[in-house]
Amino acid sequence: MNEIDKNKPQTSITINKWRKPSDQIYQRVVLAFVAEALACRRATQIGIDMNWEKVIIEGDSLSIIKKCKTSIPDKSKVCAYIHDIHKLLLKYKECIFEYIPRARNSLAHTLAKETMNNKIVVYLVGGVPEYAEEQEERDRVREPD
């Protein structure tokens, strides 16, 4: 290697192949409130597993989204999950939690319902299942101009 090559700045790019997270369907979750907290925690963990530095996590449970956004200690039935989420947030450069009303997010509801009914886990990397495309088309038709 000549002297010029030694002094050139070196750039290396790490490319991580996508790894499917472990399949995890929670059984016997009694309260929808707890299910929403578990889903939010799982979304937060998946972003870390994917090595994303910035994420936007959307949810239709306003109370869970508010709890994730605040640093005030939580004393509800989901306090352990919210505490876990706050610890996971330290691994991100930026993590934004956004409330999306269920009426505007029927695609996510359809995906969750299909997952629970069929006991399968779906990851939306590079595409969506056919039933999700059909739901999105139905939603688009219903939206006013």
Image (spheres, rainbow, N blue to C red):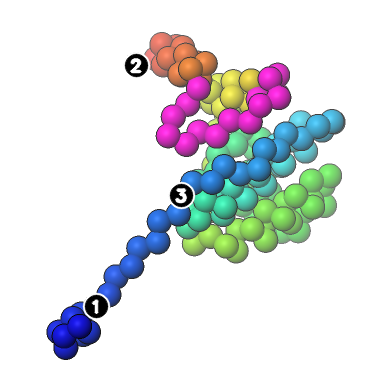
Q: Is residue 51 above or below residue 107?
A: below
Residue 2 on image: x %, y %: 16, 85
Q: In which quarter of the image is residue 61?
A: top right
What residue is pinned by disc 1? 9
Q: Main secondary structure of the magenta part?
A: loop
Q: Which residue is drawn at 76% across and 31% down?
A: 32
Highlighted magenta segment, given as a residue range: 115-129
Ranked by sequence position, the earlier of labels 2 and 1 is 1
The kind of residue tagged 1 is Pro
The kind of residue tagged 3 is Lys
The reply to whether residue 103 is in sight is no
Q: In this view, does 140 lie above or below 95?
A: above
Q: Which of 68 and 54 is in front in this view?
A: 54
Q: Residue at x 43, y 14 (%)?
A: 137
Q: Residue at x 75, y 49 (%)?
A: 81
Residue 17 got which mark? 3
100 is within the stretch colored magenta: no
Ranked by sequence position, the earlier of labels 3 and 1 is 1
